[in-house]
Image (tube, grey):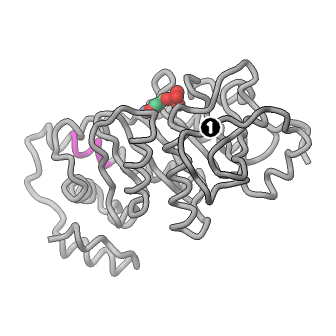
Amino acid sequence: MFKHVTDAPFVKDYAKIANDGYSRGWHERNGGNLSYRIKSAEIESVRPLLDFSKEFVPIGATVKNLKNEYFLVSGSGKFFANIKGDEENNIAIIEIDDSGENYRILWGLESGGRPTSELPAHLMNHSVKKDATNGEHRVIYHAHPVNSIAITFVFPLESKVISHLLWEMMTECPIIFPQGVGVVPWMVPGGEEIAIASSELMKKFDAILWAHHGVFCSGVDFDLTFGLMDTIEKAAEILVKVQSMGGIKQTITDDGFRELGKAFKVNVNEDYLN
Ligand code: 13P
Ligand code: ZN
């Protein structure tokens, strides 16, 4: 049992990753959002500090398999730069109701506000990943990393093309995201439509690019999810540099990717190899 919600390790880990993302330059102003599906022992460790008196309000999506689950989420319009050290005012613990259609705030956003405008996308992605990974994935992370956005203006918005290019940029990429990355065409953010498009792709991928906007990653814990974002963004940065130096002159072969898969015991997506 903790004296303050902010003493709980899951809140500290959340704030650390938010701050790391900010330090990387991925969160201008209020850009990006982060959500964590809280474990039952973790919610018990802070339960006496939660306020169960607020009304439930609609999520804007239906997530039946997340009913009665608890999430730690960033606030809409809140700056990632401010999360660490001022958690109470910038993030919130929310509870999903019995129908999977509504949520209420139990802690946080003390000076007012509501969860991220991308809450439908976060919760629909959590819903898909909870099923697809037998409950292992708990983190959904959206950021605005420069190079990952830049490449969506230049290369075809096709998952196969972009995944293959990113794999080529750094030998460990096909090991870290062997399935590749999904690509969502440009859409208005913050609504159900982009949430549905994203969650469809999350059935297959752990990371998706939102054209001209940013990246969504899913993972087991904060480190792995952040690490996936970091790897994709670094590969995208190399791609921008390679393109700026005149383009690819030599690269890793597809048989090279197959050998990597064997050596590191991962299934590199054969549909994306030639
Ligand atoms: P929020 O401030 O509502 O989280 O929105 C930021 C963002 O990145 C929208 O895609
Ligand atoms: Zn965004």
| Residue at figure coordinates x 52%, y 60% from the top left | 129
| Residue at figure coordinates x 62%, y 37% from the top left | 58
Q: Position of residue 49 (x, y in %)?
A: 88, 38
| Residue at figure coordinates x 85%, y 45% from the top left | 46
For the C terminus, the image quarter is: bottom left
Stretch of the chain drawn in magenta: 235-240
For residue 91, which quarter of the picture?
Answer: top right
Q: Position of residue 187 (x, y in %)?
A: 32, 36
From the viewer's side, name the closer residue of 241 and 175: 175
Q: Position of residue 100 (x, y in %)?
A: 64, 51
**Residue type indicated by callout 1:** Pro
From the viewer's side, name the closer residue of 244 and 160: 160
**Above or below: residue 259 compared with residue 217:** below
The secondary element bearing badge 1 is classed as strand
Residue 236, magenta (yes or no): yes
- Dot 1, how many residues are within 10 Å of its Cα: few (below 14), some (14-19), or many (20+)? some
Residue with the mark numbered 1: 58
From the viewer's side, name the closer residue of 199 and 163: 199
For residue 135, which quarter of the picture?
Answer: bottom right
